[in-house]
Image (tube, rainbow, N blue to C red):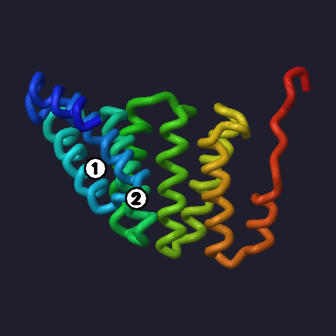
Amino acid sequence: MRRCLEIDRRVHGERHENVAYDLKELASLERAQGKLRDAEATYRRSLSIYRDAVDRGSPFLAVALNGLAELLLGDGRPREAEPLLRESVAIVEASLPPDHWLLHTSRSLLGAGLAAAGRYQEGESLAVESYAGFERSLGVADPRTRAARERVVHLYEAWGRADRAAEWRAPVEPVKPGE
């Protein structure tokens, strides 16, 4: 990924959408490797380029916003994540179809962020609606649908609503073809 980034910088210059994309991907890898401070800095460089040099309505900007916000949520910083997630939702609502998986992802993460900030009721509607959107568009077996379901479970657990968390934790069987 670093080699790809180096090539894109040489070919396109520092402030190009390909460089922003490469940085977003590098940040994702750094996050997966547990290099959270590096990942945060890399996401922020990617966002800087997307905001300055690329169409601000780009879904790739929304993906980078979600990546940094997810990192911040994992680091216990929901108040920092919220404006990023609201920006992501606005971008995706304006640029993609209403049942696109990226919109469900952005809304689901925003719901998780609101819950992490103690705003459970506000987060609940986003998290539950996002899960329903994933289930409708991708099916229950898709990893993004499962992740959204887990966010709903965590919301209810944090809210102290063990009964609701248990309902959401129950396994969901995918619909078989022909049923």
**In the picture shown, does residue 154 fall above or below 84?**
below
Q: Disc 1, disc 2: CB below 8 Å?
A: no
**Residue 141: x percent and y percent?**
72, 38
Locate residue 71 relative to residue 15 in the image: left or right. Answer: right
Locate residue 76 relative to residue 98 in the image: left or right. Answer: left
Locate residue 86 relative to residue 174 in the image: left or right. Answer: left
Where residue 149 is drawn, which disc sits there?
A: none
Q: Residue furthest right?
A: 179
Residue tagged 1: 43
Quadrant of the rendered image containing residue 174: top right
Q: Nearer the viewer, residue 3 or 89?
A: 3
**Residue 6: x percent and y percent?**
16, 32
Q: Secondary structure at mark 2?
A: loop
Q: Which residue type carries mark 1?
A: Tyr
Q: Residue at x 34, y 35 (%)?
A: 60
> Split into 4 quadrants, where in the image is the C terminus?
top right
Residue 16 showing in the rendered view: yes
The mark closer to the camera, 1 or 2, is: 2
10 Å neighbourhood of mark 2: few (<14), some, or many (≥20)? Answer: few
Residue tagged 2: 34
**In the picture shown, does residue 138 fall above or below 150?**
above
Report the number of numbered marks.
Answer: 2
**Residue 136: x percent and y percent?**
69, 35
Residue 56 showing in the rendered view: no
Q: CA distance from mark 1 to mark 2?
A: 14 Å
Q: Which residue type carries mark 2?
A: Gly
- Tell me which label, 1 or 2, sits earlier in the chain: 2
Q: Secondary structure at mark 1?
A: helix
Q: Residue at x 24, y 46 (%)?
A: 47
> Split into 4 quadrants, where in the image is the N terminus?
top left
**Residue 33: x percent and y percent?**
41, 53
Q: Residue at x 11, y 22 (%)?
A: 11
